[in-house]
Image (spheres, rainbow, N blue to C red):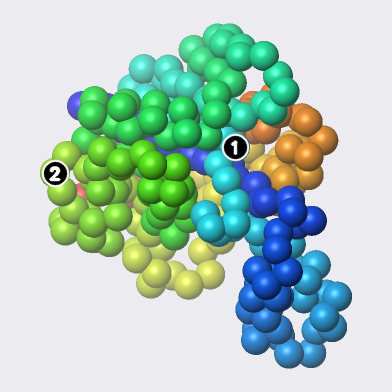
């Protein structure tokens, strides 16, 4: 059975809409990490980090790609836009709410036994599962069960390529998806105008289509890297 490639993009809440006590808690976390920072700098960093936590952020795109057929979908938020569905080179782009994209993924998950991410164990999957719970959507599979592949459920194997290629952290300075793609001669999605750090900025500017397209490029690069791992490093 084919593997399903998964990638998400996230953004943080509007800082101005957050209550003062929560702002204080978030800023204090930054202060503990670097006591030398000013209160203003701590608040600024706390705002920049909102999208990294499922408690203070949301998923704005969910991309899925069948490794064998190379067909997939990118579900994405576009506030104020009409519901649009279009097909580009086998990838369906569809405007949905966050809850709808989560529901669509979990429904799709029943057709697959292997799920592939890059750094998904420390970000995409836990973020995905917690946002699902917050929005009242029951995850259909436990993709966080057991870090090592042999510990995981047969119908829910999560292959985190960063985990696999670092040999579960044995290589501590391996780098991210961009460096991995560069080393293997794969076109990297990080060479364009947008990258993960700019998703929040693009979302505020209403550049929803560009975020969705970036998500699709991430899927393709992750798929190609997965094929390299499967051919040469999987046992």
Q: Secondary structure at mark 2?
A: loop
Q: Secondary structure at mark 1?
A: strand
* Disc ID at residue 154: 2
* For residue 159, side relative to residue 25 (left or right): left
Closer to the eye: label 2 or 1? 1
Residue 192: give x, y in percent of width and height: 74, 36
Residue 125: give x, y in percent of width and height: 40, 49
* For residue 39, side relative to residue 227 (left or right): right
Is 137 situated above or below 118?
A: above
- The residue lying at 30 percent from left, 42 percent from top is 139
Quarter of the image where the N terminus is located: top left
Residue at the extreme bottom of the image, as rendered: 35
Foreground residue among 83 and 113: 83
Crowd band around label 1 with a 10 angstrom C-alpha radius: few (<14), some (14–19), many (20+): many
Is 87 situated above or below 40?
A: above
- Marks 2 and 1 sit apart, C-alpha to C-alpha, by 30 Å
Nearest to N terminus: mark 2 or mark 1: 1
Residue for badge 1: 60
- The residue lying at 78 percent from left, 71 percent from top is 43
* For residue 163, side relative to residue 40 (left or right): left
Residue 215: give x, y in percent of width and height: 59, 33
Residue 235: give x, y in percent of width and height: 20, 50
């Amino acid at each position: 059975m084919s593997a399903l490639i998964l990638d998400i993009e996230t953004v943080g809440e509007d800082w101005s809409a957050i209550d003062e006590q929560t702002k204080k808690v978030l800023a204090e976390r930054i202060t503990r990490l670097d006591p030398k920072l000013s209160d203003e700098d701590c608040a600024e960093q706390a705002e920049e980090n909102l999208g990294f936590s499922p408690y203070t952020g949301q998923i704005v795109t969910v991309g899925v790609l069948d490794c064998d057929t190379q067909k997939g979908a990118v579900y994405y938020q576009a506030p104020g836009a009409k519901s649009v569905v279009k097909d580009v080179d086998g990838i369906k782009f569809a405007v949905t709410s966050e809850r709808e994209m989560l529901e669509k993924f979990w429904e799709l998950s029943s057709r697959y036994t292997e799920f592939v991410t890059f750094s998904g164990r420390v970000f995409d999957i836990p973020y995905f599962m917690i946002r699902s719970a917050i929005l009242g959507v029951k995850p259909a599979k436990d993709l966080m069960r057991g870090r090592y592949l042999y510990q995981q459920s047969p119908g829910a194997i999560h292959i985190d390529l960063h985990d696999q290629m670092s040999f579960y952290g044995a290589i501590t300075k391996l780098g991210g998806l961009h460096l991995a793609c560069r080393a293997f001669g794969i076109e990297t999605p990080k060479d364009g105008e947008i990258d993960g750090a700019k998703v929040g900025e693009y979302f505020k500017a209403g550049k929803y289509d560009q975020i969705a397209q970036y998500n699709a490029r991430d899927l393709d690069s992750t798929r190609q890297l997965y094929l390299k791992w499967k051919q040469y490093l999987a046992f």
